Amino acid sequence: MANHYSKEDLELYRNHQMSILGRLTCQAHLKECPACAALLKELSEDDDFIRQLRASAQIYEAIVKNEPASKSTHHSV
Amino acid sequence: MAFTTKKSLLAKVRAGDEVSWAEFYAAYKPLILLCGQDCLLTPDENDELVQQVMSEIFRKDIVGKYDPDHIPDDVVFHYDPAHGRFRHYLRGIIRYQAMKLIRKREGTVALDDSAQQVVEPSVDVWDEMWDEEWKRHVLAMALTELKGHVQPETYVAFEMYAIQERPVQEVADFLNLPIASVYTAKSRCIAALKEIISKLEEQ
C-alpha cells in the first residue's frame, strides 16, 4: 500500500480479518511507517477507554436497578 | 450530526437555566448512591443521603413530605455560578451529608447486621473517591448523551459491538453492513464521546 492505512483497515488487521497477503503487507508497512504504528496504538487506547465506559455503564445500570454496585477498584473507607 | 438540540442537563446547570427535580434526580441519584456505598452506608442511610442532598440542592424540605420519586414538576433550581464549579459544589454537599449520617450512626449503641463500623474518610480519601465516582458519572452520562450526537445506525452498531461485546460479524449481519462499517461506527462514536466528555468535564 503506497498510502497510509485507515483505522478500519488496522482494525481488520489486528482482529485477523485481513487476507494473509493483506496482513503481511500491513505488517511490513507498520514496521516502516510511524504514523500507521501510532494509529494502531491509538486503537489500543480506544480499547481501554471502552473498557472504562462499559464498566461505568454496568455500575450505573446496577445502581439504578437497586443492586449493590461491584467495582473493580472499590475503595471503601 | 446531532438529532436533538435539547440542552444537556449539565449545560443547563452551567448556563444557570432552570433544572427540574425529576431531571436532576434521574441524573444524580446514582452518583450520590455510589458515594454513599463508598462510605459503607447502609441502604436505608443511602436513601436518606439522596433525600438530604436533594433537599439541600433544591432548598426544599422533602423528607417526610414527598416521595422523592414523585416530586411536583414545578420544583426547580438554578445553579448560581458564584458557588464555583458545580462538581465541587456537589462534592461538598454530598460529603457533608454523608458525614452527618456517619456521625449519627456513631451516636447509636447497637448496630444491626447490615451496618458496619465506619470511620469518617479524610478529605484526601474523600477527594480521591469523589474523582473516581465523578469520572464514572461523566462516562455514564456521556454514553446516555451519545444517542443524540450520531446516526441511529451508528449508535446501534457501537452499542452492540463495543458495549454489549457482540462479535463484529454478528453486528454487521444484524445491521446489514460490511464489517469495516462497524469499525467506522465505533471510531465515530469514540470521537463523539470524547467531545461530550470534554464538555462535561468543564463543569
Image (cartoon, grey):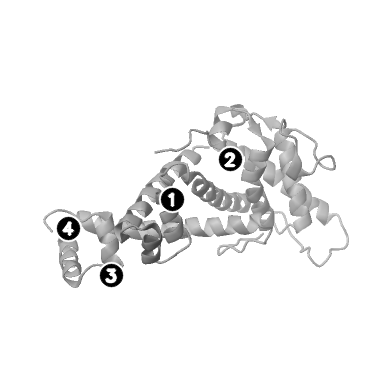
Marking on residue A16: 3
- Give x and y (percent) for residue B10: 55, 37
Amino acid under disc 1: Tyr
Q: Is residue B158 left or right of residue B141?
A: left
Tell me the residue at 36%/52% (across/down).
B185
Q: Which residue is mark 4?
A: A33
Count the marks: 4
Q: Which residue is mark 1?
A: B155
Q: Is residue B192 left or right of residue B60?
A: left
Q: Which residue is mark 2?
A: B87
- Give x and y (percent) for residue B22: 68, 39
Q: Nearer the viewer, mark 4 or mark 1?
A: 1
Q: Indicate the secondary structure of the residue bearing disc 4.
A: loop
Q: As rendered, which of B160 and B10 lies closer to the eye?
A: B160
- Separation of residues labelled 2 and 4 (CA atoms): 43 Å
Indicate the chain on which mark 4 is placed: A
Q: As rendered, which of B12 and B157 lies closer to the eye?
A: B157
